[in-house]
Image (tube, rainbow, N blue to C red):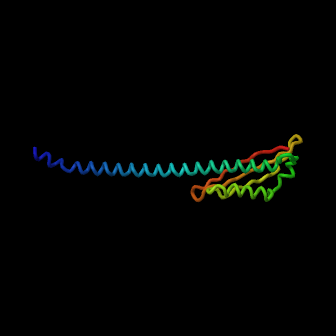
């Protein structure tokens, strides 16, 4: 009987090493998944911020195109470089958010259909840096 116990005395060490190795790999995999999840969450938050800033930039350009208590001659307001007051306001929007570095808007005439002129306003925002840099672009169409 004593002889049988002596043959089984080393198997506990093998099982212990196996469990430690498996738990180590499992812990490493979970850490990697958590890191990936945090990276995706950061990009998602920056993307939402960039999307909302692009939307705000489009609204700012629309207030320039359709001024209060004045005629809205969009063809004259839709110029290739937007006026400096608009571009300064757009850069002010970007500077209010620490993660965003650039907000630009461009107005281009598209053409005429059935006597109505169409224009496209496109705003682009760049937020984040390095691997977490995201860009969102929104466009709206305006008719006169």
Residue 34 rendering spot, x and y as whole percentages: 47, 49
Tell me what residue is drawn at x 14 percent, y 46 percent. Answer: 5
Residue 82 rendering spot, x and y as whole percentages: 80, 56
Which of 28 and 100 lies nearest the eye of the viewer? Answer: 100
In the rendered image, which quarter contains the C terminus?
top right
- Determine which quarter of the picture holds residue 100: bottom right
In the rendered image, which quarter contains the N terminus?
top left
Residue 64 rendering spot, x and y as whole percentages: 80, 50
Which of 55 and 69 lies nearest the eye of the viewer? Answer: 69
Horizontal relation, residue 115 to residue 107: left or right:
right
State the residue lying farthest toward the right. Answer: 115
State the residue lying farthest toward the top. Answer: 114
Which of 42 and 91 lies nearest the eye of the viewer? Answer: 91
Horizontal relation, residue 133 to residue 69: left or right:
left
**Number of callouts:** 0
Residue 131 rendering spot, x and y as whole percentages: 57, 57
């Amino acid at each position: 009987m004593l002889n049988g116990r002596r043959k089984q005395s080393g198997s506990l060490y093998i099982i212990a090493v196996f469990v430690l190795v498996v738990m180590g790999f499992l812990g490493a995999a979970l850490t990697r998944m958590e890191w990936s999840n945090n990276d995706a969450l950061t990009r998602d938050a920056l993307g939402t911020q960039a999307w909302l800033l692009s939307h705000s930039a489009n609204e700012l350009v629309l207030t320039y195109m359709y001024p209060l208590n004045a005629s809205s001659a969009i063809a004259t307001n839709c110029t290739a470089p937007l006026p400096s007051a608009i571009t300064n306001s757009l850069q002010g929007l970007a500077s209010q958010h620490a993660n965003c570095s650039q907000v630009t808007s461009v107005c281009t005439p598209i053409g005429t259909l059935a006597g109505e002129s169409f224009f496209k306003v496109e705003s682009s925002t760049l937020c984040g840096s390095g691997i977490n840099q995201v860009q969102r672009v929104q466009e709206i169409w305006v008719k006169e």
